[in-house]
Image: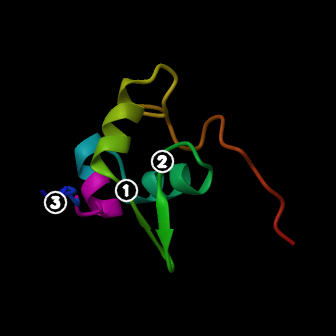
């Protein structure tokens, strides 16, 4: 018998922003700073539903935080 894997579609930045009730820019900032589990495909961020759900359960996740507070700032040359 073949083992069938369930392939879940990746969520867009807009979908995650609606889910969490924040702006798409906040989601992009969190992804860039590795605050939220994300995958970069070309110039766009994508998210796995299961990873975001687990991330929301973790204490200290960025949910509900202002994305500009405690953000890692890197110098751009």
| In the rendered image, the vertical position of residue 28 relative to residue 64, given as above or below | below
The magenta segment: 8-16
- The numbered dot on residue 2 is 3
Percent of width and height locating residue 19: 24, 45
In the rendered image, which quarter contains the C terminus? bottom right
State yes or no: discs 1 and 2 in contact (Cβ < 8 Å): yes
Q: CA distance from mark 1 to mark 2?
A: 7 Å
The front one of 38 and 28 is 38
Percent of width and height locating residue 42: 50, 80
**Mark toward the viewer: 3 or 1:** 3
User: How many numbered marks does the figure carry?
Assistant: 3
Q: Is disc 3 surrounded by few (<14), some (14 to 19) or many (20+) residues within 10 Å?
A: few
Q: CA distance from mark 3 to mark 1?
A: 28 Å
Residue under the point 59% across and 48% down: 34
Q: Magenta stretch: residue 9 in it? A: yes
Q: Residue furthest left?
A: 1
- The numbered dot on residue 47 is 1
Q: Secondary structure at mark 1?
A: loop
């Amino acid at each position: 018998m073949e083992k069938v894997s369930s392939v879940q579609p990746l969520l867009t930045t807009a979908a995650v922003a609606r889910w969490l009730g924040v702006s798409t820019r906040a989601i992009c900032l969190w992804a860039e700073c590795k605050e939220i589990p994300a995958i970069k495909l070309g110039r766009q961020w994508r998210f796995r539903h299961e990873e975001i759900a687990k991330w929301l359960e973790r204490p200290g996740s960025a949910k509900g935080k202002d994305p500009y507070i405690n953000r890692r700032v890197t110098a751009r040359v």
